Amino acid sequence: MAPKYFKTSGHLLVCQGPNCQARGSALLYKALWNHLERAALAYYKTGGSIRLTESGCLGSCSYGPSLCVYRQTPVGLEEGWYAAVDFPQAARIAQAVHDGAALPTEHQYGPA
Ligand code: FES
């Protein structure tokens, strides 16, 4: 028997490396999970579609907390990379992914 597969609109990863943790990424991760659950955005909630996991170092240690997101689009895999992320911004990124809207550009870096 296979595990249940949850179709998702995107996957957010919040760095839990030592530099990001020193800038509050553990609290950011917990606050974001609480929000995803309360707003029924978490992938396992009815109507939810967001997957969220902790990650190791994302390579922008001096600019944390760092967050990246991956989602499938009609033209392929899209990635978004963010530095100095706070809770309101993380919530906006999650909502954009859930809604299929353009990713917020504030604090975004990396590939256009
Ligand atoms: S510790 Fe978070 S990007 Fe390196």
Image: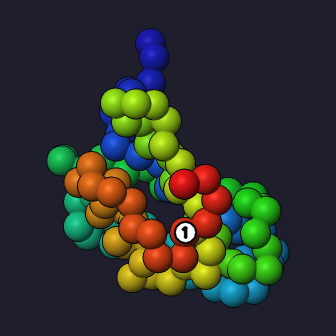
Left or right: 75 as drawn, with respect to 110: left
Left-right relation of 15 to 103: right
In this rendering, the answer to whether 22 lies above or below 96 is below
Picture colour scheme: rainbow
In the image as oriented, which residue stretches furthest toward the left? 47
The image quadrant of residue 14 is: bottom right
- Residue 21 seen in the figure: no
Please name whichever residue, 53 or 107, is drawn nearer the observer in this view of the structure. Answer: 107
Where's residue 42, x and y in %? 33, 55
Q: Quadrant of residue 96?
A: bottom left
Quadrant for residue 101, please give it.
bottom left
Q: Secondary structure at mark 1?
A: strand
User: Which amino acid does the dot numbered 1 rest on?
Assistant: Gln
- x then y, percent, for residue 36: 33, 64
Residue 88 visible (yes or no): yes
Q: Look at 72% across and 80% down and name the residue there.
A: 63
Q: Residues within 10 Å of mark 1 (few under 14, many from 20)?
A: some
Seen at 70% across and 68% down, the residue is: 16
Residue occupying the far top of the picture = 1
Count all numbered tags in the image, as a single digit: 1
- Residue lying at 44% horizontally and 12% vertically, measured from the top left: 1
45 relative to 6 in the view: left or right: left
Distance from mark 1 CB to nearest ligand 1 atom below 8 Å: no
Which residue was labeled with disc 1? 108
Looking at the image, residue 51 sits to the left or right of residue 74; the answer is right
Image height of 83 relative to 98, above or below: below
Q: Residue at x 45, y 17 (%)?
A: 2
Q: Which quadrant holds the C terminus?
A: bottom right
Which residue is situated farthest in the bottom direction here? 23
